[in-house]
Amino acid sequence: MQIHVVRQNQSLYGIAQAYGTTVDDIVEANELPNPQNLVIGQALVIPIVGSFYWVQPGDSLWSISRKLNVPYQELAKVNNISPNQSLQVGFRLYIPPPKKEKAEFNGYVEPFGKTMPPNLEESTREAAPYLTYIAPFSFRAKRDGTLEEPPLGNLPAIAKANKNVMMMAITNQEEGKFSDELGRILLTNQTIQEKFLNNIVATAKKYGFRDIHFDFEYLRPQDKEAYNQFLRRAKKRFSQEGWYLSTALAPKTSADQKGKWYEAHDYKTQGEIVDFVVIMTYEWGYSGGPPMAVSPIGPVRKVLTYAVQDIPSSKILMGQNLYGYDWTLPFVQGKDTAKAISPQQAIQLAAKYNVPIQYNQKDQAPFFDYQDENGKKHKVWFEDARSIQAKFDLIKELKLRGMSYWKLGLSFPQNWLLIVNNFEVVKR
């Protein structure tokens, strides 16, 4: 499978000819929202087995093999050339597909209201073959130890049909916000905690959940050890049922990182207790902040490089956004809010306003600028095939367990294609 970046004056027909495929296959693979109006800088996934590399000035078979992590002898063999042959600029080399590694993938599903929206259910059904876990978000803990359930719709049936583990995501949210007081009660009142665990077990058995996932955020720093103790107790209880235990963690870069989001999340201890963690490596660019990449590769790498020092890499799922943001400029923090958009919607915007998509090499993220009908300027940061491939490469480099998506319901067909190209999805 190849990632191709559209250049000026290129057409789908010409691109298809170059790679030995068809226009229809490219349109179908990418679910192209703009087949008649490609955008300069738009990344396309070309649905072929393996990929092609065109020789650049200064290239040798050895340097290409190092760049692509393929033995030069293998490159020579599959291209029917001598290992010592000098290469002409523009010569096309066939690159065999990479060896697939096993990895796990989770998708959070966040329905609003009292029923599961049909489009969200359908999005989950489409993603389910590529997922290990499906996580309805969320079961909200109450101060008396009971649970407020989200609408599940047909998610249990979808999970069963696709051999997905249902992940029971439980939060300390009240009125849409994480509550440290709710967390304090659940973690320190042993009577309520026992009732809480009993309700979790009963609910998990009712719906068939096999992973219990705590997303407890903005806890009081002084409740760190109480949270650790609670997780030890929960692990013992859930292991009796044969279930997994997982947690969501704030994106820390040191054990003693200050700030209410971070201090009660003990990477080392949780890494010892739970089966796996989801590290929330996204939202550097967020709806209430200034325009920037949502998950720039540098900060993501920094968090995960720290994490693997304290948590076994085989227990870490990298958090990944399935969306971008459209900021109206000038953006006033505390007053303005950026609009969340899917990668497909971002491409449609670039095509509509006839602006090129640029790519920030440092952040490994695409972006563009446009001016709307009212004369307002906008900046859009989003995800594409290149940015997600950079994250997949980091998963392989750090030997992580896999990736967790926030959240399903936003169209990004290239992501699922690239999962299949890079990994064998674990089913449990």
Image (cartoon, grey):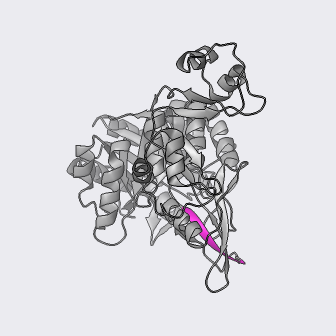
- The foreground one among 23 and 380 is 23
Q: Is residue 71 visible?
A: yes
- 264 shown above or below 255: below
Q: Is residue 329 magenta?
A: yes
- The foreground one among 214 and 134 is 134
Q: Residue at x 52, y 67 (%)?
A: 348
- The foreground one among 407 and 182 is 407
In the image, residue 181 lies at what x, y percent?
51, 64
In the image, residue 50 lies at what x, y percent?
49, 31
- The foreground one among 105 and 258 is 105
Classified by dominant secondary structure, the portion drawn in magenta counts as: strand
**Left or right: where 199 falls relative to 10:** left
Q: Is residue 255 visible?
A: no
Image quarter where the C terminus lies is top left
Please tell me how many numbered marks the rendered image carries: 0
Q: Is residue 181 magenta?
A: no
In the image, residue 423 lies at what x, y percent?
45, 34
**Left or right: where 265 falls relative to 403:** right
Considering every residue shown, the one lying at the far right of the view is 58
Give the magenta range: 324-330
Q: Residue at x 60, y 48 (%)?
A: 387
Q: Residue at x 63, y 51 (%)?
A: 263
In the image, residue 393 lies at what x, y percent?
59, 36
